[in-house]
Amino acid sequence: MGHSERAREGPADSPELVESVIIRFAGDSGDGIQTTGALFTQDSAVSGHDISTLPDFPAEIRAPAGTVAGVSSFQLNFSSRDIHTPGDRPDVLVAMNPAALKTHLADLIPGGMVIVNEDAFTRQSFKKAGIKTDPREDGTLEGHAVHSLPVTSVTMRAVEPVGLGKKNSERCKNMFTLGVVCWLYDRDTDVIEKLIDAKYASSDPKTAEANRLALRAGHSYADTVRLVPHRYHVDRAKLPPGKYRRITGNSAAALGFVVASKLADRPLVFSSYPITPASDILHELARLRNFGIKTGQFEDEIAAMGAAIGAAYGGALGLTATSGPGVCLKSEAIGLAVMTELPVVIVDVQRGGPSTGLPTKTEQADLLQAMFGRNGESPVAIVAPQSPSDCFDMAIEAFRIAIRHMCPVFFLSDGYLANGSEPWRVPSPDELPEFRARCSPDADSFQPYGRDPDTLARPWVTPGMAGLEHRIGGLEKQDGSGEVCYEPGNHERMVRLRAGKIQRIANDIPELKVFGPDRGDLLVIGWGSTYGAIRTATERSQSSGASVACVQLRYLNPFPSNLGTILDRFDQVLVPELNSGQLRLLLRAGFLKDVQGLNKIQGQPFRTWEVQEKIDSMLGLNVRTLEEGTADVGSSSGDNPQGAIS
């Protein structure tokens, strides 16, 4: 519920109570948009709201200032109820320049609020943005509540006593707009001022003071001019009891890997080559080095993968993180991890491709690469978190599986999850899983490739264990002894054992839980970051009486053991994916079901209405009209594995 849908109204002089608000900050990449959004998100979390965010970065590293190519944005949905997405369309757009307004205005709800920096609306800035006339005067903003504020000039006057100089003073204008928004939503600036101090006070006290002054100036300005007749207020969300913090997907994953190290009582060795959007995992783990974490930035992806394998051979938890192009380079060495049967976790924070593609945009196009992107029969386990906070749980789960089953595990995240944030309830120690590694200390009975009868895992024996010396490498192993063996029958036996070991993981993971009826007209299946849109669309369809349910696959190889049974209980199956139909291909091949696809490959996550419209269409309901200002979403149901995109 946004500004146009009110929960109730109080007295005229009190804030208007609303259930949820979607706000989008947008401006040049040098305007501090991501900082603004992150600070307001943190303040929302402290205020007790349920939150979901969508940061969006320019694809070009150094796009010219003031151009459409250089626009950065940050969308936040904060609510007093349980939410799963950053929202489809913002109620409020804060645009720092004409390019930002041009880029994002079409997404704003009808009658939504627009706050612009009037000092940036000059003839030169119109030219940079490709605009011929002032959108404030030519009817472009008709129907919206427009507030044109002298953001830059007032900011400059507010921070003048600090003596930062013109350029650095102007950079504080994002804090002015943040102060305006704080006033608009009935908040003081205390929490944000503390966050500013924590970030700048010790290293750059002048910048900290200037940002505080600009923040207060924005709050005071909005109050003085009475920006709107009344402010808005969102109550605290009714979240399960516990201690919460705001967390991004990359931060959650890093914390999960650290916890896995402690649970396994093994050191964590993280080796990587920097790549967007996975690099923050390196930053987070380096910051947590006091937990005994070893991090290394290697010269290339191949070296990073080799170091992770070497760490696992040495008895540590071997971890590496990359994105799709890096996985390509790691592929040969991942095959070595399969052959040596060592517990290594490969994080793939997916982005738009192919090649370097869209480095800052999200996509789910690496599933088939994780499944099959190696030479020979080379199976690995694959897990996929469904939300930023779930990255913590699935990071632990990735290493639990890797250790218990002695195999490489892919952790498939994506840019949306990695950079998005939400509240995370800090778990208690008794909620964490147990780790068990198979080891054979008896030298008399030791065989390097002797297998556990339940899991088929070989023992994890590290160098220096007397009497347990053995050969390891990329050549085929003899069953049991691990000696190099070229015998044809042995090779087939080892190939089948490695594959069977992965399939037996299905006995060790939870069964799927269906949200909604356990049988019916339509089942919607998702994986990864599609969770929020699918869950919300399913809830809305259920509320209108539709016979629809959904499941989210967090284990992709192997699938949960009851997936086939669930599929058989529904007349139709829909798989929304941010690719051209990769999970759909696997489901059709594995279960011989006529699975339909909803496929989007635009570098942006699904909006709820896109999924809901497809649900309505498949159920023969009145199809909702496509909202203006959005691109078509392809729907594929044919046999072409690449999908037919409309």
Image: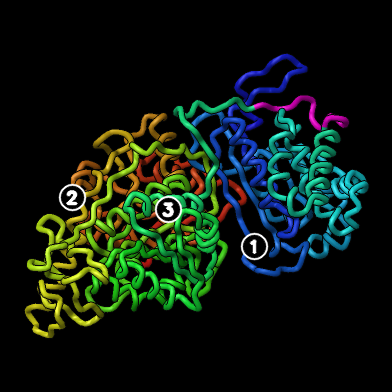
Please identify the quarter of the rendering in which residue 538 is found: top left
Mark with earlier residue (3, 1) = 1
Q: Is residue 310 visible?
A: yes
Of callouts 2 and 1, the N-terminal one: 1
Q: Which mark is residue 58?
A: 1
Query: Where residue 536 appears, x then y in whole percent?
Result: 45, 38
Going 73% across and 38% down the picture, which residue do you hit? 113
Residue type at tag 3? Val
Q: State the image coordinates of residue 615 (x, y, percent, origin top left).
A: 39, 43
Observer-nearest residue: 385 or 318? 318
Q: Identify the element where label 2 is drawn.
A: helix
Name the residue that disc number 3 marks: 258
Residue 102 position, x and y percent, is 73, 55
Q: In the picture provided, is 183 more to the left or to the right than 330?
A: right
Going by the numbered disc 1, the residue's amino acid type is: Pro
- Which picture quadrant has residue 369? bottom left
